[in-house]
Image (cartoon, grey):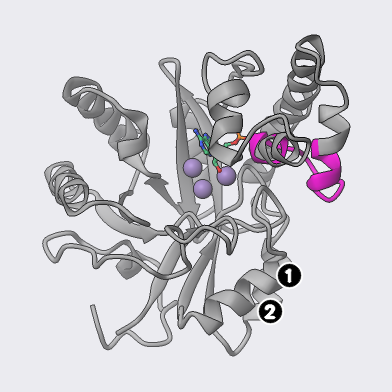
Amino acid sequence: MTVRDLHTHSTASDGSLAPEALVDAAAEAGVAQLALTDHDTLDGLDAARRAARGRLTLIPGVEISVTWNKHLLHVVGLNVNPESASLANGLAGLRTQRRIRAVEIGARLARHGIPGAEAGARHLAGGGLPGRTHFARWLVAEGQAKHFQAAFKRWLGQGRPAYVATRWAGLECACEWITQAGGIPVLAHPARYRLTRTRMAALLNEFREAGGGALEVVRAGADPAEVRHLAGLAVGWDLAGSVGSDFHEPGRAWQRLGRLAKLPSQVRPVWHHLGSASPDSSNT
Ligand code: AMP
Ligand code: MN
Ligand code: MN
Ligand code: MN
């Protein structure tokens, strides 16, 4: 059976493993097809592709931050061409937003008596662009939050004192950048958005119309009822299904590379649309 993981992060965004180390860990976990999908950047793809050679199939990907009717959504692009100008330009704009946001998060924390957060988070990001994950890790390291989740609950989550509302990409733009780069737009972790049935239906209609191709039906640690529900949505909207752990770091027991439930058989697998990328297509 081919082990796949089509949603993972590296140090190019908020993962803790460098792209090479991520590929090592994935190969060790038996993953045969791996997508690197960092937040709003393609920076890790070159290194990951080099490390993957002869060991596993690397699907070049990205996870785009989207604002849709005041909801923050994530759209994963699978099999994107890193040379695409329209994708690169779109992502560059989002990274500018991220840079501005990081400074503002730092300013808000400083106003609440916690100075130095932006520099601290930037340091944890290896000099790269700090995201909320880096701020959360810094807050924990500084003793300002008991643990990672608590940092979001107290400071960084929506509506909390250091939450900065940001206008990310439009849904249509994000899908367009991906399809123009030859990739497939995948709506990431749909259950995390806590949408009513009506709102979810509206989202799926718009996503389809924008060129959306798949739903992430299986995520790490999802309960079977959620997987069944999302499988039904995928079939109902004629979308393919994807599977991804959203791996960020080795310490998270519930989020291991390639440790995923099977995609329900009624759902068309998104990897059937990823070309002859799989080194072993004998199963599923
Ligand atoms: P950003 O894209 O910088 O706003 O950060 C979003 C990332 O932070 C997500 O991809 C998760 O990795 C993490 N994250 C967001 N919300 C939470 C939360 N409530 N608890 C834990 N991690 C979160
Ligand atoms: Mn993340
Ligand atoms: Mn996400
Ligand atoms: Mn992710």
The kind of residue tagged 1 is Ala
Magenta range is 121-135
Label 1 sits on a secondary structure element that is: helix
Query: Can I make out residue 83 in this image?
Result: yes
Q: How many discs appear?
A: 2
135 lies left or right of 75 = right
List x then y, in percent, for residue 110.
Answer: 82, 15
Q: Which mark is residue 47?
A: 1
- The residue at which mark 2 appears reads as 51
**Residue 264 at x, y = what percent?**
16, 62
Decide if residue 179 is in sight here: no
Counting from the top left corner in percent of width and height, residue 148 is at 59, 40
- Residue drawn at the location 64% of the way across and 54% of the way down: 15
- Residue 244 horizontal/vertical position (percent): 40, 59
Above or below residue 221? Residue 114 is: above
Q: Nearer the viewer, residue 37 or 120?
A: 120
Q: Kindly indicate whether the residue at mark 1 contacts the one at mark 2 (C-beta within 8 angstroms).
A: yes
